[in-house]
Amino acid sequence: MHLEHLGIAVSDLTAARKLYTKLLNVAPYKEEVVEDQGVTTLFFMAGESKVELLEATRPDSPIAKYIEKRGEGIHHVAFEVKDIHAEMERLRKEGFRLLSEEPTIGADNKLVCFVHPKSAGGVLVELCQSRS
């Protein structure tokens, strides 16, 4: 398991693109819409990890709700795992609350599952596994 990316909720992806391009001194490598999550994502490489900017595409999306409640900022921490199904089962047995029974298809060609912040010390944790 290793840190894959930090997810940052933003309300204006165009402005955030400019800010993070200057901040990280690198252009984003990928922009993608994830329809079922109601989000547009923008990825930057930051050393060996990534920064994912997330902008809501509809008012009922998790990102829109997050920004409404907490404002812009770090939304989640994502860890790459080799076997997401096995990791989900392990975490269930350890007492963690997962937000889905099965992994879903997320951005950047990944299978994803989130761990509820109430069972992870207040942090929304994403597990992700590359799809072959």
Image (cartoon, rainbow, N blue to C red):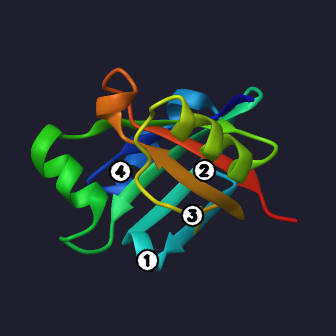
Q: CA distance from mark 3 to mark 1?
A: 15 Å
Asked if labels 4 and 2 touch by Cβ distance under 8 angstroms, the answer is no
Where residue 27 appears, as percent x and y from the top left, is 65, 46
Please state which amino acid type lies under the numbered disc 2: Phe
Label 4 neighbour load within 10 Å: few <14, some 14-19, many 20+: few
Quickly name the residue at label 1. Answer: 36
Secondary structure beneath dot 4 equals: helix
Please state which amino acid type lies under the numbered disc 4: Ala
Going by the picture, which residue comes out furthest to the right? 132
Residue 51 circle label: none
Tally of numbered discs? 4
Looking at the rendered image, the disc whose residue lies closer to the viewer, 1 or 2, is: 1
Label 1 neighbour load within 10 Å: few <14, some 14-19, many 20+: few
Going by the picture, which residue comes out furthest to the bottom? 35
Q: CA distance from mark 2 to mark 4?
A: 14 Å
Tell which circle, 1 or 2, labels the residue nearer the N-terminal end. 1
Where residue 31 appears, as percent x and y from the top left, is 58, 64
Secondary structure beneath dot 2 equals: strand
Please state which amino acid type lies under the numbered disc 3: Glu
Quickly name the residue at label 3. Answer: 102
Residue 15 circle label: 4
